[in-house]
């Protein structure tokens, strides 16, 4: 998998050596409670399992470590896309997600990473639609997704592993046609 450079970030493949940093960043309730699939507490075993799954991603999927360009060995979060597990979506429709360590919130990194990964998804694959959702307790994530071009498709519910609860969420969608229109 290639790496992606943005103005301030380097999105690179996850490495086994990222596991301790992944645990340090992800083992925060403020992070896990905002996401559907991140458990809390988050252990080294969880990180190793995640990295093992990343190595087994299908061809219509990608996962990136989010790092700062001036510190490419220091993980600050993660992002990626791929087929949703347990669904019957066609292979040209994929799910997208991202997260950042708490100390990196509010700096525009999530939007910068999201736009870059979305561009990668649409320009290097046959993906026609990207779906995502954000928990309504995390309106900042909704703003990131809107800035990246996603359209709000309404409220639903989502089980959050980190909180152990089913919580309200917003489904958001970005079609390749909309992406291309916005790209100009």
Image (spheres, rainbow, N blue to C red):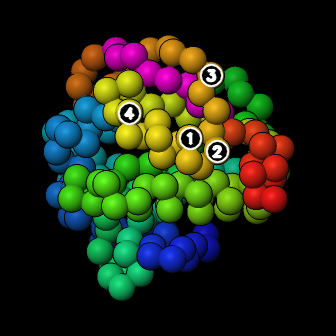
Per the rendering, the mark at residue 153 is: 3
As rendered, which of 136 and 20 lies closer to the eye?
136
Query: Which residue is found at the position 38% from the left and 24% from the top?
Result: 136
Q: Are marks 3 and 4 in contact (CB under 8 Å)?
A: no
Q: Are marks 1 and 2 in contact (CB under 8 Å)?
A: yes
- Magenta part, dominant SS: strand
Q: Mark 1 and mark 3: span between their CA atoms?
A: 12 Å
Q: Mark 3 and mark 4: span between their CA atoms?
A: 15 Å
Per the rendering, the mark at residue 146 is: 1
Q: Position of residue 31 (x, y in %)?
A: 25, 42
Q: Quadrant of residue 92?
A: top right
Q: Mark 2 and mark 3: span between their CA atoms?
A: 13 Å
Is residue 54 positioned above or below 83 on the image?
Answer: below
Query: Which residue is found at the position 78% from the left and 43% from the top?
Result: 178
Q: Position of residue 102 (x, y in %)?
A: 22, 53
Q: Are marks 1 and 3 in contact (CB under 8 Å)?
A: no
As rendered, which of 109 and 158 lies closer to the eye?
109
Q: Earlier in the sequence, mark 4 or mark 2?
A: 4
Mark 4 lies on a secondary structure that is helix
Residues packed near mark 3 inside 10 Å, few (<14), some (14 to 19) or many (20 plus): few
Per the rendering, the mark at residue 139 is: 4
Residue 23 lies in magenta, yes or no? no
Mark 3 lies on a secondary structure that is strand
Q: Mark 4 and mark 2: span between their CA atoms?
A: 15 Å
Q: Quadrant of residue 37?
A: top left
Label 2: which residue? 149
Query: Which residue is found at the position 27% from the left and 46% from the top?
Result: 46
The magenta segment: 166-173
Residue 172 lies in magenta, yes or no? yes
Residues packed near mark 4 inside 10 Å, few (<14), some (14 to 19) or many (20 plus): some
Mark 1 lies on a secondary structure that is helix
């Amino acid at each position: 998998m290639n790496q992606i450079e943005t103005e301030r970030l380097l999105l690179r493949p996850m490495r086994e050596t990222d596991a301790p940093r992944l645990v340090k960043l992800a083992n925060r309730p403020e992070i896990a409670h905002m996401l559907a699939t991140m458990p809390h507490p988050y252990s080294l075993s969880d990180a190793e399992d995640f990295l093992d799954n990343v190595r087994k991603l299908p061809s219509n999927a990608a996962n990136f470590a989010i790092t700062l360009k001036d510190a490419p060995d220091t993980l600050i979060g993660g992002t990626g896309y791929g087929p949703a597990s347990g669904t019957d979506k066609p292979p040209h429709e994929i799910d997208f997600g991202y997260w950042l360590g708490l100390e990196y919130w509010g700096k525009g990194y999530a939007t910068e990473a999201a736009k870059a990964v979305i561009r990668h998804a649409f320009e290097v694959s046959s993906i026609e639609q990207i779906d995502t959702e954000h928990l309504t307790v995390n309106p900042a994530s909704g703003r990131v997704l809107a800035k990246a071009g996603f359209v709000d498709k309404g409220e639903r519910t989502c089980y959050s592993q980190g909180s152990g609860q089913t919580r309200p969420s917003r489904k958001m969608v970005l079609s390749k046609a909309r992406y291309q229109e916005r790209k100009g």
